[in-house]
Image (cartoon, helix red, strand yellow):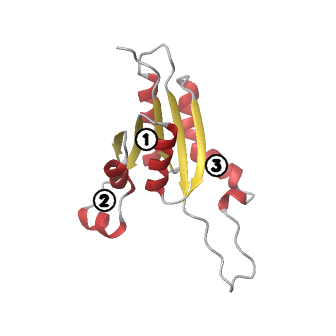
């Protein structure tokens, strides 16, 4: 059986659970025996930029256009970048705007991702029904395998 490189997408948001998911994604990529290196894609999905109304005199800039964005981005991607460098795993990071589950699924389809690694807080039934769950939506709708990391 030919074992080509795998494309692994990990959802990043800077939380400890996201760091744990990043660790699992890099470990998964490093542990796949192949002559081709597997690649990890770290994706941060920010909420849609707020829409301005006629009552706004000074529209707010998206976080990616603010001065502190560079430092914040470094902190958010620090763990996945450090682990990928240590394990010699190719890494590509990106930031997109939108609904997290939808954007992760869209990215996975566009890049032909083999597995999505995502953290799950383990919300109870009621909270999941009221607030929704990104990991649940990704598991239900992704066309590829999904690896859920529990907190």
Placement of 143 over or under 40, stated as above or below: below
Kindly give the residue lying farthest to the bottom in the view shown.
55
**Residue 133 relative to residue 37: left or right:** left
Q: Is residue 52 depicted above or below 2 in this figure?
A: below
Q: Earlier in the sequence, mark 2 or mark 1?
A: 1
Q: Position of residue 52 (x, y in %)?
A: 66, 76
For disc 2, the marked residue is 123
Element assignment for label 3: helix
* Residue 5 tag number: none
Q: Secondary structure at mark 2?
A: loop
Mark 1 — residue?
20
Q: Earlier in the sequence, mark 3 or mark 1?
A: 1
Mark 2–mark 1 Cα distance, whole angstroms, equals: 17 Å
Residue at (51%, 45%) from the top-left corner? 107
Which circle's residue, 2 or 3, is located before the other in the chain? 3
Per the image, the residue denoted by label 3 is: 73
Disc 3 to disc 1, C-alpha distance: 17 Å
Asked whether the residues under the numbered discs 2 and 1 touch, taking CB atoms below 8 Å apart as contact, a structural biologist would say: no
Which picture quadrant has residue 29?
Answer: top left
Q: Residues within 10 Å of mark 1 (few under 14, many from 20)?
A: some
Say left or right for 140 vs 5. Answer: left
Counting from the top left corner in percent of width and height, residue 9 is at 47, 39
From what the image shows, is residue 143 above or below residue 67? above
């Amino acid at each position: 059986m030919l074992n080509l490189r795998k494309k692994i997408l990990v959802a990043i948001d800077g939380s400890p659970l996201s760091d744990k998911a990043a660790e699992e994604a890099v470990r998964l990529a490093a542990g796949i025996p192949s002559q081709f290196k597997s690649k990890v894609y770290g994706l941060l999905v920010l909420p849609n930029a707020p829409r301005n109304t006629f009552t706004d005199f000074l529209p707010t800039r998206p976080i990616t256009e603010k001065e502190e964005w560079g430092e914040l981005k470094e902190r958010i991607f620090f763990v996945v970048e450090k682990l990928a460098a240590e394990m010699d795993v190719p890494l590509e990071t990106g930031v997109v705007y939108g609904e997290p589950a939808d954007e992760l699924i869209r990215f996975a389809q566009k890049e032909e991702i083999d597995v999505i690694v995502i953290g799950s807080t383990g919300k109870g039934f009621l909270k999941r029904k009221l607030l929704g769950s990104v990991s649940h939506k990704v598991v239900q709708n992704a066309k590829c395998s999904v690896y859920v990391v529990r907190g």
